[in-house]
Amino acid sequence: MAQFAQGVHPIRSEKQKPPVFIRHCAPSWEDNIQDVLIKKYQRLIPRAWLKGGSWSDAITRGGRFIVFSNGSKISFKSSEQKLNKWGGDDLDAVGQDEHIPESYYLENRMRLADRDGFFMAAMTPELGITWEEDHVLEPPERVSIEHYFFDTEHNPHLSEVGVAKVKATIKDPRLAEAKLHGRFVPLSGLVIPQFNYDISVIPDRNLHPDAFRVFCIDLHIKTPSAAMWAAWEPDGTLVVYRTAKKAFTVPEWKAFIRAKSTDGTPQMWLADETERETGVKGVYGQDSIVTAFNRGEDRLPLTQVEKGANSFEAGIYRLWSMFKPDLITRRAKIEIFKSCDYGTEYIGGKVHGSLIWELRRYQYKTEQKGDEETLREKVRKINDHYIDDVRYIAMAGPRMQIEHTDPIIVRSVMPELNRG
C-alpha cells in the first residue's frame, strides 16, 4: 500500500498514478491500528515520501491519516465505528487486516467502484468459517480471486525453535489448522456433525407413490425467505427434493410455489414467521405474512409452526438422530436430492447457499458473558434458514398412511392444484 501511495508499485502504479486514496481497516483501533498498522508503516515508509518530510507533519487527525508529499492519503478505520462512518469516500485501494464484519467489507467494495480500485486482505481465520471463505474460496461472483495460504513453519523470519514452541502450545488440532496453516475450520464444532454428504445427498429419483409431501417456508421481511419441499416415505425416511431461497413478495411466492408444486401437491403446509405476533397482526400493525398467504383465490394454506418450550433443542436432537447413518444399511433417515446442492449467490447484497452449504457451516460459537469468566457455547444463528425448514418438518413428523392416500383430503387442502 505504501508503494502504491508513492507511485512506485511495480504493477498497480502503472495503472493508477498518484495522488491515490487508500483505506486500511481492522477490527480494533487501539490493538490493530495504533499498535500494529501505524507502527509498521512508520518502519516501512521513508520520511522523504511524507508530507513535510516528517511523521509529525504526515500523521493528521489523531493518527487517522498518513499524508504523502505527492498528495496521496492512507486513512485508517476500525469496525468499532458505526457502519455509516465508512461511506462517502471514493477509494483507489482498500487494505483489510484481520476479520471484520461482512457489512463493512461490502461497504468497502462500494467505495472502490468509481475508481476501479483493488482490495487486499490478510488474516488468520481464528473465528472459524466466516464470510471471507465464501467471498474468496467460492465467490458468488464466479470470478477468480487470488488467494494464498502460508504455513507458519515456512516463515523465513521465525526460528525453528520458536515455531516448535508455538506448535506445542496449541493443543486443539482445529485451532492449529487455523493459526498455523490459515485454513477455515469450524473451531467450536459443527452443530450437526452427523451430516455426511456421501450418505445423505443422493441422486434425484422418483418418490414413493404413498409419500406424504410437506411444504415449509422460513419467512422473513428484510432477508430472503427459504422454501423447502420434502416428503415422508413409508419407511420413515424424510426426502428433501426441492428448495428455493428468494427475496419475493407474497404474490410472487404464491405463483412460484404453485408452479413448483405441480408434480405433487403437499399435504402439509408449514411456515415460520419470525416477525409474527400472537393474532393476525404483525409487529408493525400490518397483517402477518402467513395471513396474507391464506387470503384470496390463490391462497396457500400455510400454518404457523408451533414453537413450544425447548423446541429448538428438541429439533436439533431430532436432526442428530435422523442424519446419523444406520450401522447396517448405512442409510440416514434424511436424504437430500443432489439438485438441491447448488453454488452460492448474492441475494439482497449477502451470500446465500444451499441446504448442504448451511449444514457445513452451522456451528457453535464460543461467547464470554460479561458477568462471568466461564465460556459457554451457543449456536451461531447465521445462514440457517433451510436448516430451520428441515427442523420444522422433522418435528412435525410423518402422518398415517390413510392421511396421505385419501384423495378427498388432498383436494380439500389445495383444490386448485388438483384440477384436471
Image: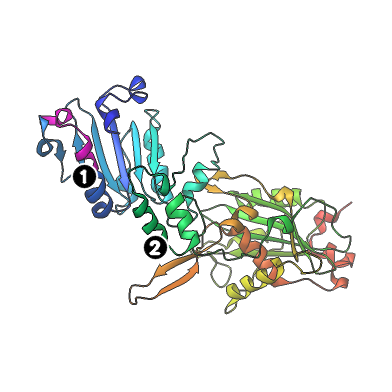
User: What residue is shown at x 47% (from left), y 53% (from top)?
Assistant: 130
What residue type is disc 1 on?
Lys
**Residue pointed to by mark 1:** 39
Badge 2 element: helix
- Rounded to the nearest whole Å, what is the CA distance between mark 2 and mark 1? 27 Å
Residue 117 % position (x, y): 38, 30
Label located before the other in sequence (2 or 1): 1
Could you tell me if residue 252 is visible in this image? yes
Magenta span dominant secondary structure: helix
Say how many tags the image has.
Answer: 2
Numbered tag placed on residue 282 in the rendering: none
**Quadrant placement of the N terminus:** top left
Badge 1 element: helix
On the picture, is 146 further left or further right than 25? right
Q: What span is in magenta?
A: 38-52
Residue 305 falls in image quadrant: bottom right
User: What residue is shown at x 66% (from left), y 68% (from top)?
Assistant: 319
Identify the residue at the far top of this view: 14
Residue 190: in magenta span: no
On the picture, is 262 further left or further right than 314? right
Assess disc 1: are there few (<14), some (14-19) or many (≥20) residues with their C-alpha within 10 Å of its C-alpha: few
Q: Is residue 394 above or below residue 344?
A: below
Q: Is residue 410 above or below residue 256?
A: below
Q: Is residue 57 above or below residue 83?
A: above
Numbered tag placed on residue 169 in the rendering: 2
Residue 411 % position (x, y): 84, 62
